[in-house]
Amino acid sequence: MTATIYRTDDPYHSRTSSQWERVSRIDPIVSEGISGPLSPTEVDQYKRDGFLFESGLFSQNEVNELLTEARSLVANWPVNRSGIVKEPESETVRSIFRMHRYSRVFQQLFQDSRLLDRVRQLLGEDVYVLQSRVNYKPAFEGKEFYWHSDFETWHVEDGMPRMRAISVSLLLTESHEFNGPLMLIPGSHKDYIRCIGETPENHYESSLRRQEYGVPSAEALEEMIAENGIVAPKGPAGSVIFFECNTMHGSAGNLSSTPRNNVFAVYNAVSNGLVDPFCDCPPRPDYLAERKITPLKSNRD
Ligand code: 6CS
Ligand code: FE
């Protein structure tokens, strides 16, 4: 019998045993009855699937400005600034983090009412940007992001208490079947997968390049995929995917000749501020998880 040492007061403990486990979530998926731009049908879709796809929410002109900014940030990244991540075994840039602090253009985007009003409608309270990043997934070189629940990582390694966060992914280039579109397992947000293994020290130094801990077992994935399959929303630049923090997702490598540049913002409910990590590691750096709460006001407020 494997010794199981975990914080019994933590309903979302993970990486505390050599046996994976599937348990129901205890947090509501949405706050009911909040008005906003989403129709009741769209709210129900989000509750059912754990994500929503809005094609063409932003114009090509708006995307062009964001693309220019994303490419200039990489080209001019200060050598002493953390938050730039390379592809595994490569010097090719995979991601940059914390644009909500370094870029006025992205700060404006994250306060855009087309994003903020939808997120606040679903969460039912004010939010702040916990993390932002651009995943570049460049042509031919962009490697996979293995299946994972963001919440499992944010809970265990950052101390996010409950499932009260939403990721927004804005496509800066077209997502098509060959350039590694985001893939999600519909309905997977309703259960929580406790992963095996123990969090290595400074795990983020490797996990952001290739995640090997805090990933679900093949058996867990087989079960969830057998129930609801896999969906890979595809569409033009300017489209947006809103996905719940516990929805299982990943993406394949990009073998096509066109990049799959996505910008992500993670909106956390202000009532869900980070506490100590739920593992025996120090908190991850602030560029990955803001520990200071700055509630957002829509740029239409
Ligand atoms: O560890 C994190 O916070 C990051 N890792 C992944 C694979 N998705 C969420 C986030 O960007
Ligand atoms: Fe993720």
Image (cartoon, helix red, strand yellow):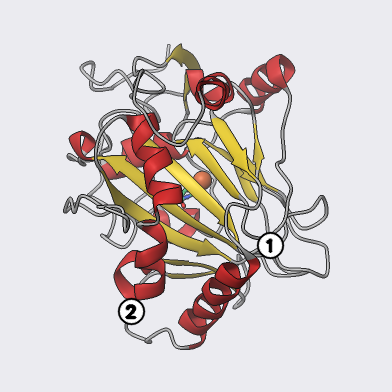
Front label number (1 vs 2): 1
Report x, y in % for residue 298. 30, 53
Disc 1 + disc 2, Cβ < 8 Å: no
229 or 121: nearer the viewer: 121
* Residue type indicated by callout 1: Arg
- Specify the quadrant of the image occupied by residue 279: top left
**Residue located 55% across and 80% down the image:** 68
Residue 3: % across, % down: 35, 18
Q: Is mark 1 within 8 Å of ligand 2?
A: no
Determine whether, in the image, residue 245 is placed left or right of residue 201. Answer: right
Q: Nearer the viewer, residue 134 or 104?
A: 104
Residue sitting at 44 percent across and 35 percent down?
245
Which secondary structure lies at badge 2?
loop
Task: Return the residue at label 1.
Answer: 260
Residue at x 49%, y 78% (from the top left corner): 69
**Residue 285 x, y percent position in the rendering:** 27, 60
Q: Is residue 200 above or below residue 50?
A: below
Numbered circles on residues, count: 2
Q: Is residue 6 visible?
A: yes
Give the amino acid type for the residue marked by disc 2 in the picture. Arg
Q: Secondary structure at mark 1?
A: loop
In the image, residue 204 above or below residue 194: below
- Name the residue carrying label 2: 81
Query: Which quadrant is home to the N terminus?
Result: top left
Q: Is there any visible trace of residue 103 in the rendered image?
A: no
Residue at 36% x, 54% y: name it.
Answer: 131
Distance of label 1 from label 2 (alpha carbons):
24 Å
Q: Residues within 10 Å of mark 1 (few under 14, many from 20)?
A: many
**Of 109 and 249, the residue lying toward us:** 109
Quadrant of the rendered structure where residue 157 is?
top left
Other-residue count near label 2 (Cα within 10 Å), few / some / many at <14 / 14–19 / ≥20: few
Q: In the displayed structure, does residue 226 sit left or right of residue 20?
A: right
